[in-house]
Amino acid sequence: MIAAEQLRRIAFWSLDLREGEFEHARRGIVEKSFAEGSYICHRGDRLESWTGVTAGLVKLSTVSRTGKAVTLAGIRAGGWFGEGTVLKNEPRHYDLVALRDTRMALMERSTFLWLFENSVAFNRFLVRQLNERLGQFIALAEYDRMLDATGRLARNIAWLFNPVLYPNLGMQLEISQEEIGLLSGLSRQAANKSLQILEGKGLLRVEHGGITVLDLERLSRYGG
């Protein structure tokens, strides 16, 4: 069971729950650590828990039948995901990899379903979350076909600052250029070049060990 103050810190959705709902939620959550480079789950695995990233960085990816590796999304600390898989009670359709030492919050499926059945606030959160994720994956299909490397990188960074998925987390993120490249399907050198272009246009600032987004709206539309 997770401590109440920890749940409030790592899960913005918990702040809107009623007292009984909040207590039920925290009794069904545990935290677990994963080393850099380790698989949290493989495609086809049954990860029964709804998952949140409490520290670190996670990549959702898959491999096509032709062997092409495709990054679906990056999840930074504060992000929660996998609700569709839990609701449908099916295997994961993607690999889940820790890009750095990562700590995860795991909510057991029975707790998730109880909140789904009993909490209006939780359902409102789920509707917003699912709608935003749908938009993200539609956009992924679009800009993977239409944008150049810098455009794809810009959009991927912008999603890490999405105000619906990551509310109140600010415009600064600890992330390496190698990690940005992995999330965007680019080499470190190509990622570095694209970051320099975006920095030159005043959209972000590259810092030691991270980035600060200066214009999220323009970054999210870059190349379109």
Image (cartoon, rainbow, N blue to C red):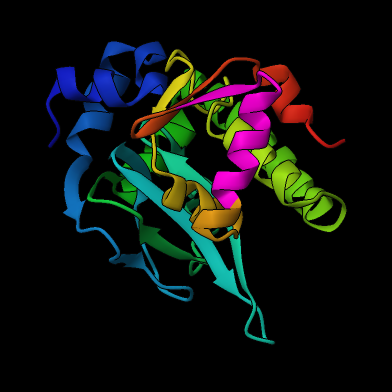
**Residue 162: quadrant of the picture:** top right
**Residue 107: quadrant of the picture:** top left
The number of callouts visible is 0
* Residue for point 39% across, 69% down: 46
Residue 31 part of the magenta segment: no
* Residue for point 45% across, 12% down: 168
Residue 114 visible in the shown view: yes
Q: Quadrant of the C terminus?
A: top right
> Which stretch is magenta?
191-206
Viewer-closest of 99 and 3: 99
Asked if 1 appears above or below 41 in the picture, the reply is above
Where's residue 20, x and y in %?
Answer: 27, 18
> Is 131 placed left or right of 223 in the picture?
left
Viewer-closest of 195 and 144: 195
Q: Quadrant of the N terminus?
A: top left
Q: What secondary structure is the magenta-colored segment mainly?
A: helix
Viewer-closest of 170 and 52: 170
* Residue for point 87% across, 52% down: 146
